[in-house]
Structure formats: structure tokens, C-alpha cells
Amino acid sequence: MRLERRLGQGWPLRRGWPWAGLVLLLLVPLVLPEGFYLDLLMFTFMYAAMSVGWDIMGGYAGYVSLGHVGFFGLGSYAAALLLVHLGLPVFITAPLVGLMASLLGAGLGFISLRTRGPAFVIVTLTFTYVAQLLMLDLKSVTGGSQGLFLPLLDLPANLVIVPFYYGMLALLVIAILVSIAIRRSKFGLGLIAIREDEGKAEASGVNTSLYKILAFAISVWFAGTAGALHAQYLNYVDPDLAFELIITLNLIIMSLFGSRGIVWGPVLGAFILYPLSAYLVFLVPSRVAGQVHLAALGIVLVLVVMFLPDGLIRSYQGWRTKRPKDARPLEARASIVETTG
Amino acid sequence: MTKDLAVHSVAKSFGGVTALAECSLEVRAGSITALIGPNGSGKTTLFNCVTGFYRPDQGEMRFGETVLTGLRPNQIVHLGIARTFQITRIFKNMTVLENMIVPVRQLGLRTLFTAGIKGHERERAEGLLEFFGIAFLRDEMAGRLSFGQQKLLELAAALMAEPTLLMLDEPAGGLNPVMIDRLTGYIRELNADGMTFLIIEHNMGFVMQLCEPVIVIHRGRVIARGTPAAVRANPAVLDAYLGD
Amino acid sequence: MSPGLFAQSLVLGVLTGGMYALMAAGLTLIFGVMKVINVAHAAMIVMGAYLSLTLFRHLGIDPLVSVVLLVPVFLGLGALVQWGVVNRLAERDITLTVLMTFGFAIILEGLQGAIWTSSYQGIKTAYSLESFRLFTLYVPVVRLISAGVSLVLLAGLYVMLTFTSLGRAIRATIQNRTAAQLVGVNVRLVTTISFAIGIAIAGAAGPLLGMLFTFYPATHWLWIGKLLAIVVLGGLGSLRGAFVAAMLLGIAEQVTSVTIALDWAPMIFYVFLFGVLVVRPQGLFGTVERQSL
């Protein structure tokens, strides 16, 4: 804080922090080749990237999706099928798989985002289950509940994590850059206007349906792409793993916890919560671990919604501006304006 | 460039309650037209029909040659009709300047992804804020503005859409006499530059000194239209206000 | 499809639809007064099934008796949760309220898994497998019972909503919250009561679900989808619509499972759900939602 003030807003280090962090993260595999930490960081990147994506819809436009894992799972399947049937490597198809997810997202958006009512919640809530059911029932293509095995990457066992590490890191960097770009564009301004007051946004000339559909399509690109990479990471995909509810739940909690509608909010949320949850799961007896994990996440979601709905960053900002230095400058000035003139 | 607004036998009802019945009226380009009537007479419903928030059950609305019926609110804004709301609506968690930029029209997807606030847009926004005397607030969160400032911001932001017809729903409501004088001045000045106004207002002093013609609606129909003096002398208008 | 098979599907569809109507009634009632989708609704129903299962296994209490036992318990819990937690939030932010019910659903699913494991369960009573013939038609006893119980409860709900002053207050709140408040309805209290009634109905439906279907903690995702399809087809907030839609979809499901495949029967709900949202977002009985400006 004090350092910041002394150096001034324009000091390059302030803007340089993210780049310094990126360089550091790029170097990690060279210094620390052990699987455990790379694994942990890779999953953190994956969740952070998807959360930033989720937040483009949930934070900027204010429409919370309960179905992002549906796109993640379909992304996994699409990548797996492209690899198994056409021999196309996942690291090349992943962005295209993401685009397929975006198209699907636009379709679902067309169904549910033209009106303002609860349709979006309904569609995203049920979509995951439909997608899972489809993958289960289309046995001839997807192998049903047996799932699909993906050919392994041709790499030594101790290095196999590295491409995924960089892949997910790249996805995270793209997510942050896209989110920043949107925040600074008219599109982003329009989305925030929709969140604040959709009717007013419409009366201001914002094409709200188009904006929302576009935002959702962009939002799910990250889930689809991450799903594709994740399928190759596991070398396997089945309906249970691909559509794990915990994934959607994580995205929501991370965004909320860090702060919705702020670029770095979901990133912060993911970097705090993923390592924490990975550690805590160890403490639970494995017999009930999955169930307890689920219930615990549900409790965390309810607690965050009740007690920290603005998230860490925004709460911190609010606490900073509430200090006496800034108190009532507007009121004082307001009275001048209203009585003179 | 400026166009007439023509509303032709528009009707709208909500679950059996008739809000507008065969309502026809015209707003001439360049006029400051007032729309008055007792509470619940259908004034705001008419606004909502014209601006695309409600779809009328029947009737037709034209702006110049363009048929408005069936268009979305955002399309209507881009034809040159902007509005404000009875209860002031601004984006409270956005800065004053951002509030001004939201109504700027985008052409196609490409411009959508360009910088949020371009230099010339900022200049125009600041010019308008200057005009309304709230430029010093440009970087404040809009929600922290006083009531009167918020009303001025809503008006200024509506102008950013470059309308030729501005529809104001009770612009003077809740303002003190000093602010009302200022507002009158702004409207006159904008009108002198060619802006057409359609104003719903309950403050009769404000209406009588500013607007002509005055249109009176009652139970969803136009019952009188004319100069302020003529309308005031019209017995049907008196009946409408006193009758029930 | 032969007429006999069709008649058979019709009978099974109507009997199952009766229970679907009961399950959907609570969901649509809660939406009506709060404008919030209770994502946890199906998880609460499944919770009712588990409780009934435990009562049956350990105390030998018949699921039909546990219907009666669970109603007051769920009514109280519903009132408590609504009054203590949901209400405060709902007045601030509907989005957060939806997320909270999503959280409740997850908590219930996790709890059920931790307590009863995630394997399939079913409530098998002495009469579970009994059936009789009506002319040429096969009528399973449990389906007839569950449809009967559902109809009785729905009739009670209907009478309450139509003829009591509480019912009038609830209907007024569903129609227009602000107007109801203006004419003196205590909408906060009405909301709490309606939510509690919705949850109580979910509790009552639990044992019925447990008798008719196998269930496991994650089954509520299947059910919330089915219920949403019913509620959306009937028009959100419309009880009468939900009833008709439940019958239609119950029959459609039976017909699909006979003509196409059992696996694809759940899909019929989603076809309807998405189809209705595309074609007629306000559902069969919903009036055109007046856009809140």
C-alpha cells in the first residue's frame, strides 16, 4: 500500500506484477520437476482459466451458469473422439473443440437468453445432465459407461505432465487477456450494464440478447478447451469423470470467493481454494472422501453466498474506500451543485 | 432530419385491465409536447409501447416513415428515440463517464471489441456533462450521486445516443424549484438546437411554461390537445382530473 | 403401437403423472411466490425417500405412514430455512438465492452419500410387487397408491389455495407481489409459509418416489430436470398447468419407453423442456410475462 503510493500508480512494477508472476510460473517445471507440485499448479491453472471464463458470463453479465461442466465434459468427449477416430492430437484440436463448445453455448443461449426470466438457470442446470445422458446412451460412439481410452502421449513418464502444465498455463493467460480485453471494450461495458439493470441497458440501445449470447459463447470456450486437455491428461474419459459436478461448483465458488466481475477475482479464488481443497481432501477418509468433499463444497458455497457475496477483492476495496479520508466528499459537493446554478 | 412521432389507435391491456384504448396522438418534430393525465391514465404505458418495452395489442406507431411496432427497445433507440424513466435509472455501480458511454451506438461486432471509451466519445460525454454542470463527477460511481445529479446524468446519458426525440418521464419529479428552473433552461436550449421532446409531467407549472402543445389522456384515450391555456380551459380535462 | 399397449401406457402414465404433479407442485409454488428456482427441490424429495427408507428398515414404519410423519418435519424445516436464511437473501439478490439453493442441493447430495453410501436403494414393502388386472390392463398397486396419495394431497392444496384466506393471500402474492403488499398482504410471511408448504410437499413425495423408483444421491439431477420440464411446460408458477403437464409428460414417458427404448425415456422430458423454451417460453398456462422494465 504505502510502497504503491510512494511509487505512484504509473510505476512499471505495478503493472509488471502479472508478467513477473508468469515468468516465474514458466520456470517452475525447470526448477521443480516433481510431479506433485506441477500437478497441483496445473489443476490450479485449469480451474483459474475456467473460472475467469465463467465470470465473463456470471460476473460481467450477471447470469450465473450452473452447467459449465457440461461443456467441459463434451469437450473431453469431442477431443477423445477426434483422437481415437481421426488420429488428431488433442493439443491441436483443443482450441477447435472449445469453438464447438462455444457454438453449442450460443445455441443454448439462443434458447434461454432472449428473455430475462429464469430460463438461463433452467437450461444450464439441466444441460449437464442431458449431455451426460447422451454420452451414456450413444453407446456405439462413446462406449457408454465403459468410456473411451485415449492413446498415451509419447513422452517419458516423468515429463508427461509438462505439456499439460504449459497448456493449462497458456489457457489461463488467454483467459486473463480476453477478460481484460472485454472489460476494456464497449462489449464489456454493455455486459456490466446488463448486470446492473437490463431494462435500462436495453433502453440505452444495448442489444442485450446478442451481448448475452456472445458472452456465454466466449465463457464456455474455456471449459470446452480445458475439458479437451483434461481428457488427454487422464488418457481416459467416461460419463462420470467428464461431467463431475464438483467442477461447476468449484468455478462458481472460486469466482464468488475472489470477486465476481473483476478480472483477477476468479484467479485469486482459484489460487487460494484449489490448493487448499487438494490438501483438505487428504484429511478425509477415502471411503467417504468424495461425498464429504461434495457436502463441504456445498457448505462453502452457502457460506460464501451469505457472508462474502462480494468476494475478497471487492470487500477489500470497499473497506479501503470506507476509511474516513474519503468520507462524504460527494455530499458536500452535491449541496453546492443543487443550490447554485 | 427530425421526424414526427405518430401513434395510431394503439391499445394495450394487462390481464383484462385496459391501460390504453385506441390511443392516437402525434408529436411534431421540433415541439416540446407534454403528455398529462391523472394517475393511471396510461401515460407511462404509452411510453413503454413507443420505446418497445411493451408490444401493443393493436395499432401502429411510426417515427417519420419507420414503423416502430415490433421493434426491440435497443433498435428504437438507434432510430433516434431516447427516453428516461419515471424512477430514475442509472447504472449505480458504474462511473458517471461509463454511464455516458453505454448508450454510444456500436456498428457491428468489430467496433464492439474496440476500446471501451474512445477519445472523441469521451470529449462528447464530457461536453454534455459540462453542459449539465456535473462534469466534475465524471469518475465517481453513479450510485453515489445525489438524487438531482442522478436525474441530470440520466438525461445526459440519454443524449449520448444522439436522439432526435427525447421522451422524459416526470423529469421534474422530486426536484426543488431551483433545479426545475435549470432543467427548464436545458430543455429549452436543446430544443432550440432542434431536439423534439415528449414529456410526461405532473408539475403543472413546469408544463404550462415550457410545453406546447399539451396532450391530455384519460383512461387510455386522448381527451384534449392544444395550447396550455386552451387545455386548462377545457371542461373535459377538469372532469378527468376531478371526476374520479 | 397397438391400442392395447397404448391403453396400458396411458394407465401407467397417468398413475406416474399423478406423483410427478405432486413433486412439481412444490417447485412451481415456490417459484410463484419467490420467482426463484429451488434447485434443491428434487434433492429434498430424495432426502424424504432416504428418511422413509430408514424408518422402514429400522422401525418397520410403512412408507405411507412416513408420508404423514415427514410432512410436519419438512414443513418446519422449510419454514426455518426460508425465514432464517433464504428470505434475507431473496430480497437482496435473486441470483445469489439461486446459488444458495444450488448449494443446498449439493449439501444434501453429499450428506446422503456420506450416510447411506452412493449405491442404489429402493423401498421394498410387502405390497411392492403386487398388481391386479383391470380388464386387460395391468395395474401395479404401488403406482395406484402413490397416485391416490398424490391426488389427495393435491386436492388439499387446491382447497387451501381456493377457499382459505391464506390461499387467497398466496395467490395474490404469486400474481403481483407489490400489489399484494399494497392491499395489506404480509408478503414476507406468505412467502415463508408458501416455501414451507412447497418443501412439505417435497417431503411427502419422498416416500412415494422411494416406493416407485430406485434412487441414489445423485438421482436428484435426473428429477430436477423432469420437474423443471413439467413446471416449464405448465407455465412457471401455475399449479393447474403443472398438473396437466405432469400427466402429459407421464404418458409421453411411458409411450417413449415402450416404443423407442427405456434408456431414452428420460430424454423426452428434456425434448419438451427445450422445445417449450424455444417455442413458447411462458409455457402452456403461463400468461405472457410482463417484462419487468
Image (tube, coloured by chain):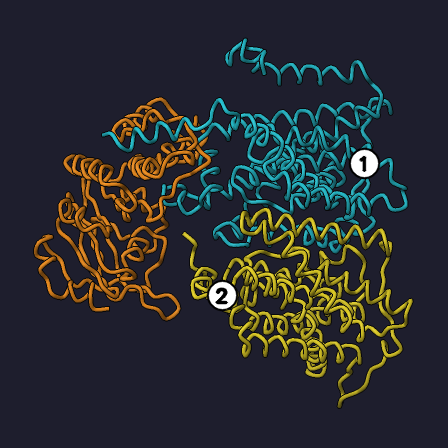
Is residue A279 shown left or right of residue A128?
Answer: right
**Which residue is disc 1 drawn over?**
A235
Question: Mark 2 — on which chain does it sit?
Answer: C
**Chain A: drawing colour:** cyan
Residue B43: x and y in percent read: 27, 57
For the point 58% across and 13% down, the residue is A2
Q: Chain of mark 1?
A: A
Q: Quadrant of residue C264?
A: bottom right
Q: Of the numbered discs in the image, which one, if any, rests on residue B173?
A: none
Where residue C167 appears, as percent x and y from the top left, is: 55, 73
Q: Residue at x 64, y 44 (%)?
A: A306
Q: Colour of chain B?
A: orange
The front one of C218 and B206 is: B206
Q: Amino acid at mark 2?
A: Val
Which x, y percent locates residue B14?
37, 65
Label 2 SS = loop
Q: Position of residue B195 (x, y in %)?
A: 19, 39
**Residue pointed to by mark 2:** C185
Q: Which one is closest to the eye, mark 2 or mark 1?
A: 2
The chain displayed yellow equals: C
Q: What kind of residue is marked 1?
A: Asn
